[in-house]
Image (cartoon, rainbow, N blue to C red):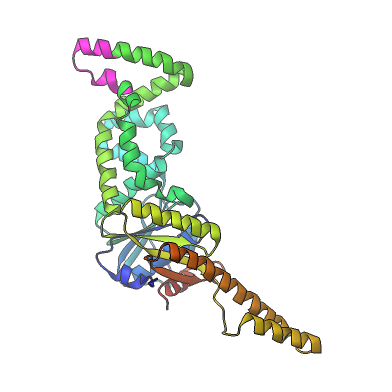
Amino acid sequence: MSALEVDALIDDPGTRVVVCCGSGGVGKTTTAAAIAVRAAERGRDTVVLTIDPARRLAQALGLAELGNVPREVAVPGFAPKGSLSAMMLDMRRTFDDMVLAHAGPKRAEEVLANPFYRTISSSFSGTQEYMAMEKLGQLAADGTWDLIVVDTPPSRSALDFLDAPRRLSTALDGRMIKLLTGPARAGGWGLRKVVSAGFGLFAKAVSAIVGGQMLADASAFVQAFDGMFGGFRERAQRTYELLRSDGTAFLVVAAPEPDALREASFFVERLAEESVPLAGLVVNRTHPALAKLPAAKALGAADSLAARGDAPLAAAVLRLHADRVALAQRERRLVSRFTKAHPGVALAHVPAMAADVHDLAGLREIGDRLAGA
């Protein structure tokens, strides 16, 4: 087991993207924000992107809210050597912006007004991951920042954006899409007649299940959107290649709890399968023992004091210390199981804070603990 060198990671100009992933409730958003703040203060021009709809990142950075475009963090007491911007993904706005940027005015108007588009752009399965890929690609292509920190959604969906290009390609090359666009793509009159006849039979069968109007809206949407499919797929593929490049580092964040560490094992194994670069595991909110006094001795001393009726406060402190030692030992056993299964994964332990982190001072302290300071 090796130590995760966070400062070496963020100081390396070759590191362009840091992706924080893990299950929910393990401090992933706080970790991403702390890394971004530390990188900016050490001289990197940094942007942090959260895909988590919760607004904890804005609060921790002292901002009232975050939008779909990067906003520079400029609050009292924050004067980094580099710079720091932050944003929160709005998948509907990102989809709209993509349509406006890559379609002609008439076609963009048709797409944006289509009821089927309005449905998939806000609630269709996988849309968030597609748009996360799109936004990450935009930030990387912009050139304003030399480090992008990504805070992902909780649980296993955090890795879904790795599948987005493949799932998108499968969807766009699928039989239903070809049937929906067939009449528009057919070249000659005779071929149009054959395709249209086939589409009519297909539409009649499907409309009985999903409804005629929905099918008509879907067909109109796909035909209007047809010219954009290739470009979207190519951009998503480029972003996927960026995520697999040497300039990207994935950090898996976990709490020292059985469920969270099981999820961490899943992430590590999945990243290995995808040949995605893993920097290490951040074990967040640990409870190291505060003194070297063994738990058994602490309890023995507490019992002796209690038997004599002496120093009740000291006895209580000794019992608390024994509980803390037991908790620290339990956490070490759990982490040890992970390291035995994944001996090559570097680790960083971040002791729990006394209170929730909600400002820059707290993020700086988290950054210090991440770096082992």
Residue located at (80% from left, 89% from top): 308
Q: Quadrant of residue 78?
A: bottom left
Please say if 131 is above or below 83: above
Q: Nearer the viewer, residue 90 or 2?
A: 2
Q: Is residue 263 left or right of residue 49?
A: right
Q: Main secondary structure of the magenta part?
A: helix
Tally of marks: 0
Residue shown at 56% from the left, 78% from the top = 289
Which residue, as the protein is rendered here, is positioned at the far left?
188
Q: Residue 356: horizontal and vertical position, in percent? A: 55, 66
In the rendered image, residue 244, in percent from the top left (x then y), is placed at 28, 53
Q: From the viewer's perspective, is residue 67 above or below residue 18?
A: above
Position of 145 with respect to 30 (left or right) is left
In the picture, the quarter occupied by the C terminus is: bottom left
Out of 333 and 227, give the one closest to the viewer. 333
Q: Does 169 appear above or below 22?
A: above
Tell me the magenta residue range: 180-195
Q: Locate the N terminus by quadrant.
A: bottom left
Left or right of 184 on screen, residue 57: right
Q: Is residue 305 magenta?
A: no
Left or right of 144, for residue 285: right
Q: Going 41% across and 46% down the picture, which residue do you hit?
A: 90
Q: Is residue 312 visible?
A: no
Image height of 133 relative to 12, above or below: above
Q: Residue at x 42, y 60 (%)?
A: 252
Q: Is residue 187 magenta?
A: yes
> Percent x, y for residue 116?
41, 28
Can the viewer see residue 302? yes
Where residue 361 appears, as percent x and y from the top left, is 47, 72
